[in-house]
Image (cartoon, rainbow, N blue to C red):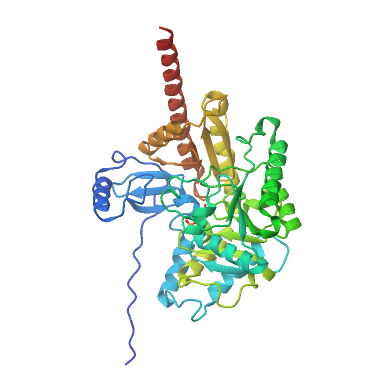
Amino acid sequence: MTETLAAPAAPQLAPLPQSRHLATSIPGPRSLALHAERQAHVTDGFGVALPVFVDRADGGILQDVDGNRIIDFASGIAVTSIGASHAGVRERVARQLERFTHTCFMVTEYESFTQVAKWLNEHVPGAFDKRTALFSTGAEAVENAVKIARSATGRDKVLVFDEAYHGRSLLTMAMTAKVSPYKLNFGPFPAEVVRTSSANPLRSPAAAQGPEAVTAAALADVEATLAEHGPEEFAAMVIEPIQGEGGFVVPAPGFLAGLRAIADRHGIVLVLDEIQAGMGRTGTLFASEHEGVAGDLTLSAKALADGVPLSAVTGRADLMNAVHPGGLGGTYAGNPLACEAALAVFEAFEDGSLLANARSIEAAAREALAPLAEETDVVAEFRGRGAMLAVEFADRGTLAPRADLAKAVSERCHAQGVLTLTCGTHGNIIRLLPPLVIGPHLLADGLRVLRKAILAVAAESAAAVSNTAVSNAV
Ligand SMILES: *Cc1c(COP(=O)(O)O)cnc(C)c1O
């Protein structure tokens, strides 16, 4: 007899309503109970932005176990860009689940790995012959880019930038700028990582002279740092084309092109970490397209497979093939479920509508939030590209960072059923990363809640300032 295994019938869930709904306070009683249980079993080393337990998620909505529907301005940190249960992803992953979950690409091969590599080679900027290596996490992609650059150049050093974020493994912690919480108590770190200036248009010492001066000053710092440490010793410079955890900093125009020229002059591999800003987030497939710059190696992860762990290093074939056979890999690298999810993501981007959505999200958010820089004394800047947007809180004039206000605004939004995240070296920035599939009404509702929260917190802050003034005068 031929043995067969019966396939269980797939349960059909009703579509998740795309509207905000408060059934209980947030977090509700079930979430609170589950969180208490979690604390009994899970390390305290993991933080949490909003302690609600999710039951379902799709489009722009997270539905929690208490029946609250929360507007998702986080996308699991820029991951679920096409929705957290996209039909195409579900279908492809389900079909793959029926066939096999894993072989290890270093043991026996499967076609989807090649197809993901082929798509990335065709779509990552750079008019040259490319190869791709797949891994599982963003940090792994960063580490492997450094391995590849060192192997290809025979050099050791890695240049990184102020406010950079590259991950939580030992090498990528060394490359990350911010100490708390990422690096605190976890050293010593690998050597040969050298940090230099980024081109932050708001906070550069040259900011008052305008963006061109910011670019010129930062590039001069880069040259000075290289001269000090020996440019011929650098294998790679690694930069986020728009910084993520460091504060959604869009570098001043011309900075990336300037780095490209410096890298070429010194034979340094330019690595663009597009892990957060790539895969359509900013309204182009890759954020570096806004600046017309191609990296020698380009890194993808986060939104690449809509939440199934997958990362990639894509770049010049001569560099990618400089590594000895067997030098790259990983048990789960390019897992077949993740590759199928990535192919569904690529299909979702085919007609260009998701990129158009990213640009519409920017337009709506800009209209709602950009005026706050004039309307309040504590919004220093609204910035970003596409659906990667941020509001920075700082006192007018001094630009003293106001993490307290970012936190207060986030708390108000959370209580109202809008999930926002903070970021930045000083924690004084609220970032918006809505899924690219969020509908215009849901987006408008979330932006209205956020705008009201900012106005209320700004008014409280202004009242506190004038109270202090009054009591000082008495
Ligand atoms: C998230 C992130 C990483 C690390 O990715 P993990 O999957 O968390 O390891 C690296 N670089 C950037 C720019 C990121 O945003």
Q: Quadrant of the N terminus?
A: bottom left
Vertical relation: 57 (above or below) 326 = above
Left or right: 125 in relation to 165: right
| Total numbered labels placed on residues in the image | 0
Give me the residue at 64% from left, 66% from top.
121
Q: How far across and how far down the image is residue 90, in percent?
A: 44, 64
Left or right: 275 in relation to 456: right
Left or right: 46 in relation to 267: left
Residue 350 visible (yes or no): no
Vertical relation: 93 (above or below) 272 = below
Q: Nearer the viewer, residue 234 or 122?
A: 234
Vertical relation: 69 (above or below) 235 = above
Direction bottom: furthest residue: 1
Q: How far across and how far down the image is residue 285, in percent?
A: 62, 55
Left or right: 101 in relation to 27: right
Report which quarter residue 12 is drawn in: bottom left
Q: How far across and how far down the image is residue 127, in percent?
A: 73, 63
Q: How far across and how far down the image is residue 256, in percent?
A: 68, 49
Q: Quadrant of the C terminus?
A: top left
Direction top: furthest residue: 474
Give me the residue at 66% from left, 68% from top.
152
Residue 293 visible (yes or no): yes
Q: Nearer the viewer, residue 460 or 200?
A: 200
Report which quarter residue 286 is drawn in: bottom right
